[in-house]
Image: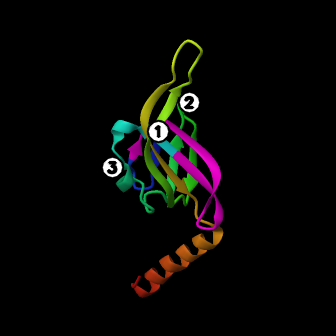
Amino acid sequence: MRVILHNGIELTPVLVTGAQIQVQGAKRDSLTFVFPGSEGIDTLDTVFSDTACESIKIIDDNGNENIYKYYTLRAKLEKALMEIVPATPETEAVMEERISVTMTQRTYIENQLALLSALNVLLTGEE
């Protein structure tokens, strides 16, 4: 699986999942990207910026492409042990360190405000 951010940065997460979660008082669509613990939390903190996530292209292992727009609000960035292989009666669970980043989508009103702000910058040259 490959992930290509708006700024062209390409990443290879172990897993990407989607869900609806409550963030900043609104129910939002979210994407959670899971990376090996060796990836570096500081690097992922920098890479997953609001401008980089204006557009996210996800290409699965079969070559199918999906584009996700406006996932600019970070809900979570954490490093934790995750169960990779469940325990069985004969063996213990296999745990590995993973870093997960959850980005959530802007609401309709937030998108409209962002467009107005961009238009204001174009017209006045001031932010």
As drawn, is 58 to the left or to the right of 18? Answer: left
- SS majority, magenta: strand
How far apart, in angstroms, are the residues tagged by discs 3 and 1?
17 Å
Nearer-the-camera pick, 72 or 58: 72
Q: Rounded to the nearest whole Å, what is the CA distance between mark 3 and mark 2?
A: 28 Å
Residue 36 vs residue 25: left or right?
left
Q: Mark 1 points at which residue?
A: 2
Q: What residue type is labelled 2?
A: Asn
- Three-letter code for the amino acid on which mark 1 is drawn: Arg
Q: Residues within 10 Å of mark 1 (few under 14, many from 20)?
A: some
109 on left or right of 119: right
Q: Residue type at mark 3?
A: Thr
Residue carrying label 3: 43
Measured Cα–Cα span from mark 1 to mark 2: 11 Å
Q: In which quarter of the image is the C terminus?
A: bottom left
Q: Is residue 114 visible?
A: yes
Dot 2 surroundings within 10 Å: few (below 14), some, or many (20 or more)?
few
Q: Give the range drawn in magenta.
A: 10-32
Which residue matches tag 2? 62
Instruction: Give coordinates of residue 42: x percent, y percent.
Output: 33, 51
Residue 16 image offset from top left, x and y in percent? 54, 41
Q: Looking at the rendering, which quadrant does residue 113 occupy? A: bottom right
Which comes before the other along the chain, label 3 or label 2?
3
Residue at (48, 76) in percent of width and height: 118
When the figure is inspected, residue 5 is found, relative to residue 50, above or below; the finding is: above
Question: Is 20 inside the magenta-drawn segment?
Answer: yes
- Please tell me whether residue 95 belongs to the stretch shown in magenta: no
Q: Which residue occupies 49% across, 54% down?
A: 76
Reading the chain from its start, which is encountered first: label 1 or label 2? Answer: 1
Question: Mark 3 or mark 1, which has the lower sequence index?
Answer: 1
Could you say whether the residue bearing mark 3 is in a helix, strand or loop? helix
